[in-house]
Image: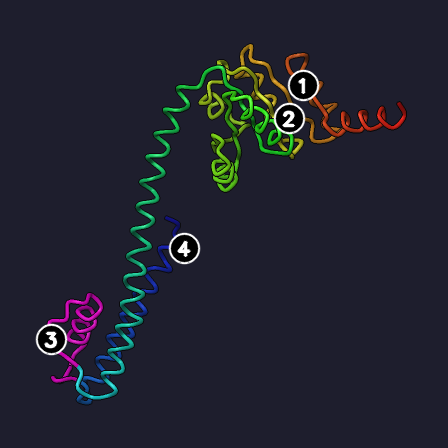
Amino acid sequence: MRLTEIIIYVSAIMLVLIFGIAGTYILGQHGGFNVKISNLLDAAYFTIVTMSTVGYGDIYPVSESAKLFVMALIVVGIGIFFGVIIALSGEFMNDRIEVLTGGVNRFEKRMLNKHVILIGSDVTNLYLAEKLADKEERFIIITSEQANAEHLKRLGYKAYVADCTSEVEMNEFAPKKAKAIVIDVKDSSRAIYALLVAKEVAGSTKIVVVAPSKDSEHHLRNIASGKAVIVNPADIAASTISNSIFK
């Protein structure tokens, strides 16, 4: 849980407590309750008992203003109090689910063999994923963003969040056992770093890199040194169209 969220939750509860204690103390001094509330401890006691829905009944409002105050404390106070409790419980459950999901993912990674690794989810890899799925080929998609991974999972793909420029993280996906590694990321510098890492971890696995631009294609070919195939979809499409027009 982020520090900002903790501060917000704690502040919300503190504001409700201050509101309840101050209101109870002021109204209790002027006959708003069945007993006179002459100290902050009694005011805090009534506020906490009310917010916790225990309601012992030893202190209760008798004046109209006190009744209105208590109703406001119940509606606002209990709402915020239990809202924070639910939010904290939800955070805890999400953490547990992430831990469990991480365990399942690690098991799946150990089972990877003769698969295709798609690094990045730009246009070419998304089309390729459809083709591989149609052919019932085993493949995974690696992305750097959690939201993107969740979207890909909803499409029915096995997607993981990892840094394609990290040898340690890439080795988790059994690159040496893969049929091929296809790199398709929008950022040219990231594509270059991804290729450098892929060359280190792939072993004899075939590497294909989709060049994000004409300039990056030249740099990628130099880095590939014959150990990777560099393709430029825009150049291929332009050549195809040109041949079709002037055929």
Residue shown at the point (60%, 17%) measured from the top left = 207
Q: Are marks 3 and 2 in contact (CB under 8 Å)?
A: no
| Amino acid at circle 4 | Thr
Under tag 3, what secondary structure? Answer: loop
Q: Which residue is under mark 3?
A: 57
Which is more N-terminal, label 2 or label 3?
3
Residue shown at the point (13%, 78%) measured from the top left = 59
| Amino acid at circle 1 | Ile
Q: Which residue is under mark 4?
A: 4
**Residue 16: % across, % down:** 30, 70
Distance (Cα) linking label 1 and label 3: 78 Å
Which is more N-terminal, label 3 or label 4?
4
Residue 223's disc is: 1
| Amino acid at circle 3 | Gly
Q: Are marks 2 and 1 in contact (CB under 8 Å)?
A: yes
Crowd tier of the residue under label 2, counting other residues whose Cα lies within 10 Å: few below 14, some 14–19, many 20 or above: many
Q: Which residue is under mark 2?
A: 192
Range shown magenta:
33-60
In which quadrant is the C terminus drawn?
top right
Under tag 1, what secondary structure? Answer: helix
